[in-house]
Amino acid sequence: MRVALTAPDDILNAGHTAIQEALDVLGMRAMHFLATPNAQYDHLLWWRAGAEIIVRWCDVARLNIRVEASWEKRSVDGTVESSADTPLPAWHEAMRYFRYSQLRDDLYAAYRDAYLALESTLSEVALPKSGEGDRAWHIRACAFLQGQGLDFASLVNGAGAGPNPVAEFVDDQFNANRCALFHAKVNRHHLVPGVLADRRLVAAALERVGRFLTQAANIVLGASNLIGVVTLQGMELHADLIAADLELAVSDDRSEADAADTEINPAGGAITVLPTAYQGVVDGIGYDFGFEGEIAVPSLASTEINSTASRVPDAVMTRGNVEELVVDGAHRFQYFMVLSFDSRAGLRGGFDL
């Protein structure tokens, strides 16, 4: 039985699943191995809602914000110490796994490397005992780190709502994610790479492992860093200030987007400014904030769309190319833009699938 899908997220998940399965078969049959990078952000959807056809273009504007600090201490005798004088830590295998987790484009591969960095760090704290299971070993090593000041209450779902945040952290990572990601038995729960619906689960687990590693590295490896934290609340305040004046627009202008652009249509194409609504936080894991513009197709200055843009009264904030999106025959056009603050606490936030 065919089911009519009318929610954009449902349509995206169903369409992405079909595409992934087709690419799997193509890879096995013809040895052509292809991917759909950034599908969760950059995609075109269309569907029927009653008698209407709706076309929706989605893209993302990524902003990197990094907070760094330094310190300097001057003694009465005139000596000066500063953060630049702090000795470098000795190399450890965990650093390799952690670095590779931040270099991966694939979210699932990044999580695996981060988890290996976690295990490497724990093995430096306490080696597994004979006959000791991995879960018991993780809890024992993490309990030691808790005694050394590692804040596990900040690393679990619900911000440590339970009585034993160490066990919660281990179960969250080990049972729900390690077993799901490192195993593929068809008769047991597991995650298949590239499934949009599972992305938030894996991204949340990776973000918490990353914060564990930054704390544990200081305690175990003497690898302290001076990277500050950008909070979701702080980003909300920033996005709220932008939202009051931000407008989304489209144009048939074919000129390539450039960082120096000051106009939505540098080559003089027809512009349509869409009525724009701020959607607030659309993904708290990725610090993603949504803006949606919608208009009746007959009200577009041109039904051929070659570029998109966002602007505030005194500046063009973003501009991108669509490449000949013709919406003749549709009734309504939507442009959904995600403003994503891609990095916090120095950790990567955005990954391909």
Image (cartoon, rainbow, N blue to C red):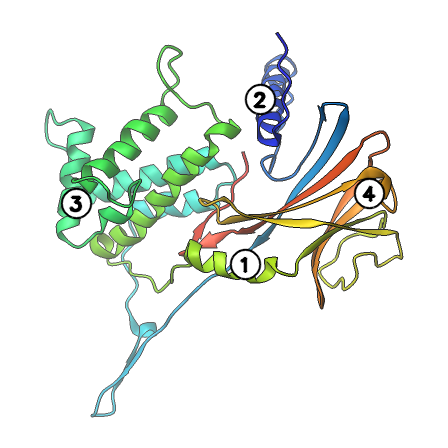
- Can residue 194 be seen here? The reply is no
Q: Are marks 4 and 3 in contact (CB under 8 Å)?
A: no
Q: CA distance from mark 4 to mark 1?
A: 28 Å
The amino acid marked with disc number 1 is Asp
* Quadrant where the N terminus is found in the figure: top right
Q: Nearer the viewer, mark 3 or mark 2?
A: 2
Residue type pointed to by label 4: Ile
In the figure, residue 16 lies in which quadrant? top right
Q: How crowded is the residue under tag 2: few (<14 C-alpha within 10 Å), some, or many (20+)?
A: some
Whole-angstrom CA distance, mark 2 to mark 4, is 27 Å
Please identify, in this view, whether the residue under mark 1 or under mark 2 is nearer the observer: 1
Closer to the camera in the image, 114 or 176:
176
- In this rendering, which labeled residue sits more in front, label 1 or label 3? 1
- Find residue 150 and report its horizontal and vertical position in percent: 21, 52
Q: CA distance from mark 4 to mark 3?
A: 57 Å
Q: Which circle, 2 or 4, is nearer the viewer?
A: 4
> Which mark is first along the chain, 2 or 1?
2
Counting from the top left corner in percent of width and height, residue 168 is at: 23, 36
Q: Is residue 145 above or below residue 140?
A: below
Residue indicated by mark 1: 240
